């Protein structure tokens, strides 16, 4: 099964840390401010912000290795293999949360990633479903839901959006 937080930290450090293809001057987590800036798009290996925070936290010997300030969407990059492996099992959300918190220990990032994991799990278990957002919203509102997060209510924004099931708004699909 999925390794522990410490084992994942070690593996991430070995893959992204010093002496790897990611260890470039532009990717250095200790690079001084005001140094050379990246020319976008990046051509080659890149360490995004949460990985740089992660490397610094590991180097500092911190128990919690994830960035507490990076709330970018990076967390969802870890969820597909975990959801595929654990879909329908009660520990699925715990496994996803553990993996995300290795590099991103931001509660909003975790809540959003877990909502995305619920959506993917629903598709894996049930196939295509235009009602998936409502199903996941109902899960997030359930006081007895699996792996509740304090910020689950912040994720529930869909009700402020259109109730239509059309994925691409008409104004983007008409030739006028």
Image (cartoon, rainbow, N blue to C red):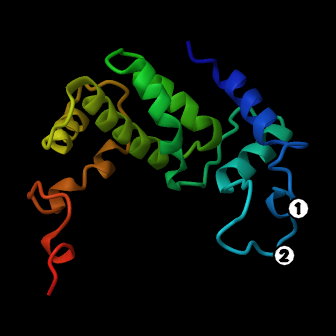
Residue in front for this viewpoint, 76 or 22: 22
| Residue drawn at the location 46% of the way across and 24% of the way down | 94
CB under 8 Å between discs 1 and 2: yes
Residue 165 is situated, as x and y percent measured from the top left of the image, at 11, 54
Which residue matches tag 2?
36
| Quadrant of image for the C terminus | bottom left
Q: Is residue 81 left or right of residue 9?
A: left
> Residue visible at 20% across and 26% down?
126
* Residue found at x 15% / y 55%: 159
Percent across and percent down for residue 81 are: 49, 29
Q: Disc 1 designates what residue?
A: 25
Which one is nearer the viewer's eye here, 24 or 34?
24
Mark 2: give few (<14), some (14-19) or many (20+) Cα within 10 Å: few
Q: Is residue 55 above or below residue 158?
A: above
Examine the rendering and report whether any part of residue 60 can be seen: no
| Most foreground residue, 28 or 106 | 28
Q: In the orientation shown, which residue stands out farthest toward the bottom?
A: 176
Q: Secondary structure at mark 1?
A: helix
Q: Could you tell me which quadrant the N terminus lies in?
A: top right
Does 88 sit left or right of 72 as displayed? left
Identify the mark at residue 56; answer none if there is no mark. Answer: none
Mark 1 to mark 2 CA distance (whole Å)? 9 Å
Residue 129: % across, % down:
16, 38
81 with respect to 53 (left or right): left
Q: Residue furthest front?
A: 175
Residue 140 placement (x, y as % from top left): 25, 37
Q: Earlier in the sequence, mark 1 or mark 2?
A: 1
Rendered image quadrant of residue 3: top right
Mark 1 closeness class: few <14, some 14–19, many ≥20 residues within 10 Å: few
């Amino acid at each position: 099964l999925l390794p522990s937080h410490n084992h994942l930290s070690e593996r991430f450090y070995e893959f992204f840390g010093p002496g790897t293809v990611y260890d470039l001057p532009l990717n250095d987590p200790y690079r001084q401010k005001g140094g050379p800036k990246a020319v976008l798009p990046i051509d080659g290996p890149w360490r995004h912000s949460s990985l740089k925070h992660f490397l610094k936290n590991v180097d500092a010997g911190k128990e919690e290795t994830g960035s507490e300030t990076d709330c970018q969407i990076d967390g969802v990059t870890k969820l597909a293999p975990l959801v595929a492996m654990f879909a329908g099992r009660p520990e699925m959300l715990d496994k996803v949360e553990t993996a995300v918190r290795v590099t991103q220990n931001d509660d909003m990032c975790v809540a959003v990633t877990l909502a995305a994991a619920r959506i993917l799990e629903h598709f894996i278990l049930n196939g295509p479903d235009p009602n998936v957002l409502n199903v996941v919203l109902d899960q997030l509102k359930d006081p007895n839901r699996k792996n509740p997060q304090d910020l689950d209510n912040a994720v529930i924004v869909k009700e402020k959006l259109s109730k239509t099931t059309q994925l691409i708004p008409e104004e983007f699909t008409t030739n006028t």
